[in-house]
Amino acid sequence: MTTAKDLFLIAMDSRQKQAVGQGDLSLALAGAELIDLLGAGALTLEDDVLVPGGTTAPGDRLLGEAGARIVRQAPYESVEGWLWRRGKDLAAAYQTALEADGVLTPRTAGRLSFGARRVEAVDTPARHEAVDRWERREPVLTALASIVGIGGEPSDGEPGLDDDAATAVVAAVHDAVMELEAVRQRRTIENAAFANLWRGP
């Protein structure tokens, strides 16, 4: 399993107190893919620029799709650019892929609902692996989950990220999610002002 798939399954876990927004999760999934690609040597990070590496992406289908979308001609892409480009509707793509793999199944109620369809995780080795990684408080998974509101902030006693590239990606995901939230708030204010205008004094 990849970090992105583990993160998706943890986000769906019914024990989580707060549902995760599709946009926030999509950005975090794009970041998770990026960290796995960097770890596999498919990319290197130079300053904030993603430089193609000499190895191919791991065998996972979705991670392979991500690897195929790496910008391979200079000027290369920034981490922020990757998150917004790759993250578009990525949570829905993961839901579809995990359903096709039998890791998710439709249900009448669930933690994540994209459109009218709701799904839940099946009791599979993939789910057990994700839960085990989560319970071990694996630093990358914990950090990305925290950004989208799962599990709270990592405690001081937990191991932190020991990789500069992963740290940079996690920081970029955090900034992107904050930017998305700012856009949401601005739209809410604009919509409220528009409604008041039509309502009149």
Image (cartoon, helix red, strand yellow):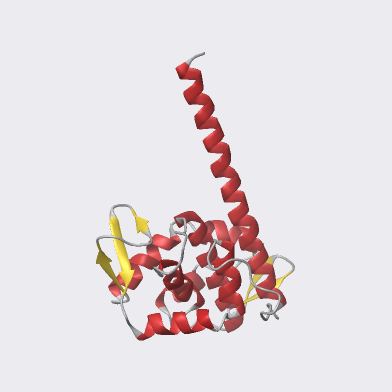
Nearer to the camera, 193 or 23? 193
Q: Quadrant of residue 39?
A: bottom right
Residue at 44% across, 69% down: 8
Outermost residue, right direction?
47
The quarter in which the N terminus is drawn is: bottom left
Q: So how many labels did they put on this image? A: 0
Residue 2 horizontal side relative to residue 154, left or right: left
Residue nearest the viewer, comparing 10 with 66: 10
Q: Residue 61 in the image: x percent, y percent?
A: 40, 77
Across and down, in percent, residue 148 comes to 54, 61
Q: Quadrant of residue 167?
A: bottom right
Residue 183 location (% of width, % of height): 57, 43
Query: Residue 62: x percent and y percent?
Result: 42, 73
Q: Is residue 40 above or below residue 24?
A: below
Relative to 12, is 55 on the left or the right? right
At 51% from the left edge and 79% from the top edge, which residue is drawn? 134
Describe residue 98's horizontal placement relative to residue 199 as left or right.
left
Residue 185 appears in the picture as rendered: yes
| Residue lying at 51% horizontally and 76% vertically, measured from the top left | 3
Residue 41 seen in the current view: no
* Residue appearing at x 56%, y 75% in the figure: 141
